[in-house]
Amino acid sequence: MNFKNDRYKTLVLPPRIKILEALGAIADERIRVLDEKNAEVVSSDGSRKYHVYVDINNGIVSSNDNGTRYRGYIGYPIIAFLMLKKMLPFDKDIAEALKGIQWKKLNEKYKRYFIVEKIVKSKAMKQGISPRYIDDFIAQVISELKKFEFKMKEEKTDITSYF
């Protein structure tokens, strides 16, 4: 691949909740690894399929989820794929506690990630996972994500198609 003439934007760290969403996607078996660099992730309500690409050697990633594409952060499909590749920490106990959560529905209903995080932690606590344990895990993942500098190819818009 020739990356010289392409334009890239550096992705920023994700909201904390996205680490938990990634665990939920793994627990729900919504990720299909296609090969070393590609995966597909199905949304929690099954309405969308995200295509994930990760090239660790070049620091290039992409995903068509809204967080990655439009908000410029490392989205949960990328995080989940990196967890499966053992490039980020994974916690089976937390993942199991987050199984079956309808993330999209919660995010759309409450529109505030900190509220959704409280709800999710409450569910996990009922299964014996303390909020502190979850916070420590999130901190570990964020710490590991800081070691990477992921870039995503900027999409080009052909304005001539509008005329």
Image: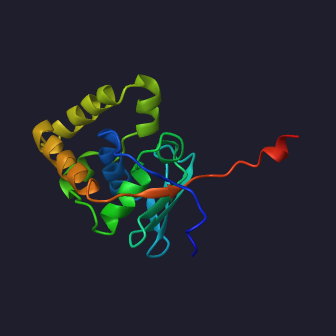
Whole-percent x and y of residue 114? 29, 28
Residue at the right extreme, as displayed: 163
Q: Is residue 133 left or right of residue 153?
A: left
| Relative to 69, residue 114 above or below | above
Whole-percent x and y of residue 11? 42, 49
Q: Quadrant of the N terminus?
A: bottom right
Q: Is residue 38 left or right of residue 137?
A: right
Whole-percent x and y of residue 54? 44, 66
Q: What residue sits 11% from the left and 39% below the top? A: 132
Q: Quadrant of residue 77?
A: bottom left
Q: What residue sits 48% from the left and 39% below the top? A: 71
Whole-percent x and y of residue 59? 41, 65
Q: Quadrant of the C terminus?
A: top right
Q: Is residue 72 visible?
A: yes
Observer-nearest of 8 and 50: 8
Q: Is residue 25 left or right of residue 130?
A: right
Observer-nearest of 39 and 62: 62
Q: What residue sits 26% from the left and 52% below the top? A: 95
Observer-nearest of 19 and 98: 19
| Relative to 42, residue 162 above or below | above
Q: What residue sits 45% from the left and 25% below the top? A: 109
Colour pattern: rainbow
Q: Is residue 126 visible?
A: no
